[in-house]
């Protein structure tokens, strides 16, 4: 698989200094929270025209939320072929955003309308809706609650009865706010978040809000192969049975299946360059 040259890789922790300088940040700028190394298990085809805003794995299938007004939808995908098995288009005025599964139901956010929709996973039949305050970016379920990101450094916790916000959490790295929290996923008691606009995934302690690790996906898709500057990593799905992740990006032609590795188990060469694709 193609890898980003070392000169193009940057420290994910450098995002907390000044997110606008991400493109030129170098690893030496910050004493970084460790990057989590990973290996690529497989690569699957993905619709290169899909502006991916949400991704979730449920009962053997991938479900995806697509953004852009007039093109937004929710989809059920066949992982191996990349084929869209079922799709439901949103009203042309809506911009699809985060997607998660709660109580065996799909929940899809929209960006600025304050609207969210509930679907039956099997046939994507809409079974309900609710409203929420602020913008919707990413979403995940945690401890029976819906967690929403809005592009800031805060996560909102919403009850699933009245869909009212009951708490919020500031996300920080070494005390510095981590802005741009986007697509979310819950993995082994942590909340993972794509950080926009970057190829970084923050591993967040949901009690303290502290980033305890970073996953740097910049080695998966070289910048030279991306069709647009907005084609950054976005989309995290977790297979609880295997402990593996599926990740993709906006307008990316592939979905990658990853296995996180323990740093101490790696050979010295790999440990020196964590987070690169194998």
Image: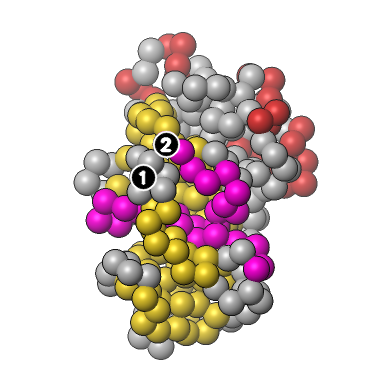
- Outermost residue on the left side: it is 241
At a point 32% along the width and 20% down the height, the residue shown is: 265
Q: Which residues are magenta?
A: 44-70
Q: Is residue 244 magenta?
A: no
**Quadrant of the rendering where the C terminus is positioned:** top left
Q: Quadrant of residue 145?
A: bottom left
* Residue 218 as seen in the image, left or right of residue 213: right
Q: On the rendered structure, is 164 left or right of 6?
A: left
Nearer to me, 269 or 56: 56
Q: Residue at x 35, y 49 (%)?
A: 78
- As drawn, the label of residue 79 is 1
Q: Residues within 10 Å of mark 1 (few under 14, many from 20)?
A: some
Q: Are marks 2 and 1 in contact (CB under 8 Å)?
A: yes
Residue that label 2 marks:
44
Q: Is residue 162 above or below residue 245?
A: below
As helix, strand or loop, the secondary structure at mark 1 comes to: loop
Find the distance from the CA under tag 2 to the CA under tag 1: 7 Å
Say if 250 sits above or below 90 in the image: above
- Asked which quadrant contains residue 171, the reply is bottom right
């Amino acid at each position: 698989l193609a890898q980003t040259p070392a000169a193009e890789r940057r420290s994910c922790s450098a995002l907390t200094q000044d997110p606008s300088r991400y493109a030129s940040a170098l690893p030496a700028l910050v004493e970084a929270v460790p990057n989590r190394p990973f290996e690529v298990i497989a690569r699957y085809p993905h619709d290169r025209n899909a502006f991916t805003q949400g991704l979730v794995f449920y009962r053997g299938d991938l479900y995806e939320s697509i953004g852009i007004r007039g093109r937004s939808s929710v989809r059920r995908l066949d992982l191996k072929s990349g084929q869209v098995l079922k799709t439901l288009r949103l009203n042309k005025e809506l911009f699809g955003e985060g997607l998660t599964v709660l109580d065996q139901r799909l929940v899809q956010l929209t960006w600025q309308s304050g609207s969210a929709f509930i679907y039956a996973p099997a046939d994507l039949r809409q079974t309900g809706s609710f409203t929420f305050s602020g913008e919707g970016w990413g979403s995940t379920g945690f401890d029976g609650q819906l967690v929403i990101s809005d592009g800031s450094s805060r996560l909102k916790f919403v009850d699933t009865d009245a869909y009212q916000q009951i708490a919020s959490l500031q996300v920080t790295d070494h005390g510095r706010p981590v802005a741009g929290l986007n697509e979310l996923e819950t993995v082994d008691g942590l909340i993972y978040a794509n950080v926009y606009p970057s190829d970084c995934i923050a591993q967040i302690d949901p009690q303290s809000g502290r980033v305890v690790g970073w996953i740097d996906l910049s080695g998966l898709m070289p910048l030279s192969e991306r069709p647009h500057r907005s084609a950054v990593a976005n989309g995290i799905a977790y297979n609880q049975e295997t402990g593996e992740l599926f990740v993709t990006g906006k307008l990316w032609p592939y979905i990658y299946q990853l296995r996180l590795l323990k740093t101490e188990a790696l050979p010295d060469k790999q440990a020196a360059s964590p987070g690169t694709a194998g």
